[in-house]
Amino acid sequence: MGHRLSKIYTRTGDAGETGLGDGSRVPKESARIRAIGDIDELNSMLGLLLAEDLPAPIREALEGVQHDLFDLGGEVSIPGREAIADSHVVRLEALLDKFNADLPPLKEFILPGGSRAAACAHLVRTVCRRAERSLVALARTEPVSERSRQYLNRLSDLAFVIGRLANRHAGRGDVLWQPGRNADGSGKPAG
């Protein structure tokens, strides 16, 4: 393990640049730093979700994902490094298959919400999609691991499924979208 932070402020970023893991300095608004920030925000959102009442298998899976996201942030902070392997993506796919197996098939779109845990899971999903877009944008100008983008893509799907499971755990169902519900201003479905 590398050196630990013994001093939280360094003043080295006061001029609008920050250091990468390889020692190079880049502007704080660069695509690489944006991607790192989005991954960090995603991990923080997972922490918020983990503060909710969740079944043990979901909690265990998400705690593992938090470690993966720290690895991913480290990967992005060192150009050319690859920390996310095929096995990470395969593990998320296996979790998706396992967690989705007992859910009823969707016939309608669902809205983010229901229980507080489900709403948090949907926030995780949307922040994950943003982190994925940031990695795609970075990949337009610099090499980025394809597995890292796949990992975030699968993780957003997993967050969607966990939102559905969180509602069931809370004794609620999916919040179904009702097209045109407020078309006449009554708050009731049109038609």
Image (tube, rainbow, N blue to C red):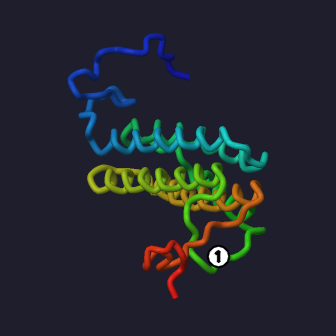
**Residue 118 lies in what quarter of the image?**
bottom right
Q: Secondary structure at mark 1?
A: loop
- Residue at 78% over, 46% down: 56
Residue situated in front as seen by the camera: 157 or 164: 164
Figure quadrant of the N terminus: top right
Is residue 94 something that shows in the picture? no
Circle 1 residues within 10 Å: few <14, some 14–19, many ≥20? few
- Residue at 30% over, 49% down: 142
Q: Is residue 39 left or right of residue 103?
A: left
149 shown above or below 180: above
35 shown above or below 2: below
**Residue 35 lies in what quarter of the image?**
top left
Q: Position of residue 184 (x, y in %)?
A: 43, 79
Name the residue tied to disc 1: 106
Q: Position of residue 23 (x, y in %)?
A: 33, 26
Tell which residue pokes out farthest to the front in this image: 186
